[in-house]
Amino acid sequence: MITSFLVKSLDRTIAVAVAILLLLAVIVPALNLLTAPDHPLHVPTYMVSLFGKYLTYALLALALDLVWGFCGILSLGHAAFFALGGYAMGMYLMRQIGARGSYGNPLLPDFMVFLNWKELPWFWYGFDMFWFAALMVILVPGLVAFVFGWFAFRSRVNGVYLSIITQAMTYALLLAFFRNDMGFGGNNGLTDFKDILGFNIQADGTRAALFAASALALAGSLVVTSGIVGSKFGKVLVALRDAESRTRFLGYRVEHMKLFAFTVSAMMAGIAGALYVPQVGIINPGEFAPANSIEVVIWTAVGGRGTLIGPIVGAILVNGGKSIFTAAFPEFWLFALGGLFVLVTLFLPKGVVGTAQHHLARRRQARAAARKEDEQTDLEDAKPMAAE
Amino acid sequence: MYRIIQTVLAMLFLFAAMPQGLRAAEGLRNLVNALGEAKLSAMDEHIAALAKTGEPEVVAILDALGAGNLYARKTDGQVFLTKESGSNLALIDPISGESAGETPKAAMSKIKVNNSVRRAVRAALGGLTLLSPDRAQRLKAAQSVLQTPDVDALDAVENALVAEKDEAVRTVLEQARAAMLLASDRPIEEKKEAVRLLRENGGREALPVLSAALGSAENGLEQDIEAAIASIEQAQEFWNAGQNVWYGLSLGSVLLLAAIGLAITFGVMGIINMAHGEMVMLGAYTTFLVQDVVRTSFPHLFEWSLAIALPLAFLFTGTVGLVLERGVIRFLYGRPLETLLATWGISLILQQSVRTIFGPTNREVGNPFWMSGAFEPGGLTITWNRLWIIVFALAVFAALLFLLKKTPMGLQMRAVTQNRRMASSMGIRTPLVDALTFALGSGIAGIAGVALSQIDNVSPNLGQGYIIDSFMVVVFGGVGNLWGTLVGAFSLGILNKFLEPYAGAVLGKILVLVLIILFIQKRPRGLFALKGRAVEA
Amino acid sequence: MTEKNPRTLLYLDGVSVSFDGFKALNSLSFVVEPGELRAIIGPNGAGKTTMMDIITGKTRPDEGEVFFKGDIDLTKRDEAEIAQLGIGRKFQKPTVFENHTVWDNLELALNRGRGVFATLFYRLTGEDKRRIEEILATVRLTARRDDLAAGLSHGQKQWLEIGMLLAQEPELLLVDEPVAGMTDAETAETAILLKDIAKTRSVVVVEHDMGFIRDLGVKVTCLAEGSVLAEGSIDFVSNDPKVIENYLGR
């Protein structure tokens, strides 16, 4: 009974959340662009970018929730997919700079000229076209996740072992991207972007459009994820999360199920990264740091894993808190973050949204039970016993 | 003669009046300036006097004299090393080695030399440092002669060989002599003997000497030299491999130290303690504090500071671990992923606490004398601190093994981890055992920190560098198996160091990570996996 | 008893497996005919669960052959494949999906497409709906169809699991201690249920409860130390001196 209510309320919450996101995608840019700076409802551009960044974080957390909340895979390397998507977008933006770089080389990005490279490496080909870069934003993280997951799930690495090797994966990528000869700008990463699709990346209009794109991407992903979770496939995911070998003995190829969820999730993370980079104006290897991935986990945990709204709420809450906190007491942010990890795991395992939903569902159920009590008993007696 | 006496007297006077460094420099300057006024016939004595000072600058001065590059300024008699610079001379101060501007040639007079002076210079140069009473200096001189062997110094080297008693210096000198012999016009037998000697001692330095000699070799000497080169290269490869093994063992011992506490908390208890690295860090900071107190209050105890830090670090980090287990982790048993997150949070708090208290920069932890320096068996270079850390890591491992296998406490620990309910019903106080086991793991991380403070930067980020590697070691070796941790640590260490020369340090590390990830696919439960129904459940 | 019958459903020959030197199965040979209901008894550590692990692909034998329906080699397949071939398994400890409703548990177990995309785009058809309702009635859980499985009693969970196995439509059902922790009334009903199921498929039941096995009234195999000790009717087996020595007597 709880579930049937949960399902109904869940569907409604998703619809509301999608509606809010669509609304935001229109209203925030409008308030930024169409109102005068001194208007009381004016949203300054830096706020647009800041919240745009939060939305990409929310998308990343949602991606993680698909595998952690519903499938039981605690990935400690999801920021790696985010960063890969970000690098794909960054490569497009680098190519867009063209001859406007400080070395004025029409083909090679500045860092390659600096390293005395003569030719564009093969893996930079095609990134001057937006459609190609956009494809790579999805394909590269998807492929990395697919290959990694194929190995990991096939040999039934799970639980903390899986978490640890996902962490090792992002650590290895971190080390790799720090190297200059990888061809991704080494330590400094990719930055100094000029424009995207021909629009100045610093312009208010572009910023507003990027915000709207982030909101739309989040709304779209929410719909897709909700569809996945609501399908029989989603039920299988929860089933294998709770009793993996039972699921196997029912004939489901658990590794395929996990692989699909993991890959889809990595692709979503990639999209998030691609929207993040133009809004913050830089992508560097630091994004691969294992600490980043673990931070994503705490956003999801704070909001409530296993709920779709939870990670979004969590990402915005924690990052909003971080922005306020680091401005006020920069010394103490890590204390706060560390404390958050401990307190949430100890006292709020379902997260904010999960706990709220739980209480809501209990109250409704109690009310419904009280209302239905009489007919319920009649019904039960009337049901046929068809065993013999 | 009189002039010399005068100079010496002046020097004596100055000696009394000046601080020592300056005094020596001033004495030297007077001696050098004396060269400018000396007659050709008296040069020998001046050169000998200069050589006698044993100052390192003298070498350059004598070199310049021999090459005719030493000039005296006509106005004040100051002597300078010079370099041609168009029609001018670039002056270099003979003592400081600094540039002293340019002067027209006409303003300078060249200090004249003839063959007898040149001989005297060469002899003095060779003898100067090769005969120095200080062994280290002799060794250095011998090595420098070996690196740039000059036929002219052959006599000096042979003289030095007669007087030399020290075995190490002798070896180098003999090699140097052999190298010079090859370039000289001595008879072929002596040269063959020289090649044999070079081959036997076969260091890296002998290779260029032999290659150079190969060009002018004849009468069957070529084959000898080629064979010698091949043999030395082979030996070099062998020693290089040996050195890599050593580096690997050293890295392995570091990994073992970092991972061994984890082998208890993760391997035996199944707790994912992401704050493990921070326990190591706390151990290192304990060492820093102990040294700080020792330095200011009991300086005579400095050599013992590590020994004092060990138990303190164990107790301190063990207590932190105990508090952690009782305060947080015990509420999360059976929820490993949550434990991971909570301990990560704790690691952030610990790091930031240390950063707040001690600042974000590296803290200086000193090495006691028995931890510094190195020795060289064969072609290897072995530093004492690395050696002690290997010994220490093995000792900690052995102690832990003993504790787990042979003591009542170890028995209780194993009982609780294998079957908690049964252990509990047999009267073992399982919560106490849990807490003590975790404290033990943390304490071991702390003493690992004491050791690692000797070779790593003591900063708030110290632990982060070890946490992923430590988990890799435990997972690779097989969870719940101490021997697996030992083998895992050393094999990963050696693998890493053997990959480094081919792939570079960073790529080597990436390769190792990829290999471990692949290995876990193949054997998800590590090298020394437990098999059977119990672990499947 | 090891001679190969073309109509044999399950055929094990000379199967051995050991864990860290402990021989869990020692050259075990064993045959199940189509439509047969077979009971297996034996002391702890006799290898009953390990045998089931081997049949369902969870454990690989060190040596020996395992064939299903005459020529399908089970030792080369994994759990999912073997389940899809038509072998269902009930665990010793009831394992149902606690965070799903009773209905969803059965829907998941239903013998339909199990691929990623088949499940992603699955729609509940009228036929599937009828089938689930039928099974719900069989295992007497119709009234609780919308409740989370976590809320069921122990006995109800056992039945739900049996219901899931029925939904799977296996040809061979392996049931590990189905009546452990059940009341006497539940035990008797379970015996009736199992006999009913065995009308259309083969069932292998592992049990300790001798009364329950007597209720079933079928051929009994007694395992000890990883191989077959005795086989026959319950009276024959329980009078076998070796069985008394190894299992019943002590």
Image: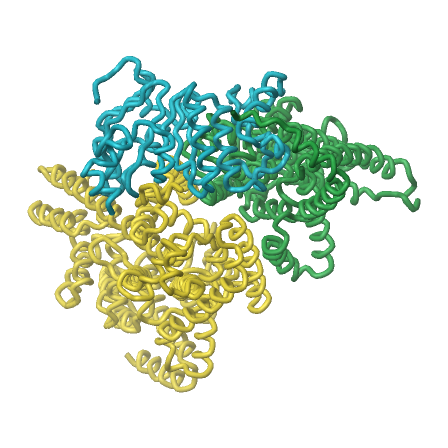
* Residue B134 position (above or below residue B125): below
Q: Position of residue B306 (x, y in %)?
A: 37, 72
Please name the residue shown 60% across and 19% down the image: C130
Q: Is residue B407 left or right of residue C176?
A: left
Q: For this view, does C145 lie left or right of residue A21?
A: left
Front residue (pair A157, B536): B536
The residue lying toward the viewer, choosing from B102 and A138, is A138
Q: Position of residue B168 (x, y in %)?
A: 19, 62
State which chain is coloured green: A
In the rendering, at what x and y percent does residue B350 appear?
55, 62
* Chain assigned cyan: C
Residue at coordinates 74% horizontally, 54% vertically from top-left?
Answer: A324
| Horizontal arrangement in the rendering, residue A319 relative to residue A45 (left or right) | left
Name the one closer to the observer, A106 or B82: A106
Q: Nearer the viewer, residue A310 or C23?
A: C23
Which chain does the yellow colour mark?
Answer: B
Indicate the position of residue B11 as horizontal and vertical percent values: 37, 81
Identify the residue at the far left of this view: B189
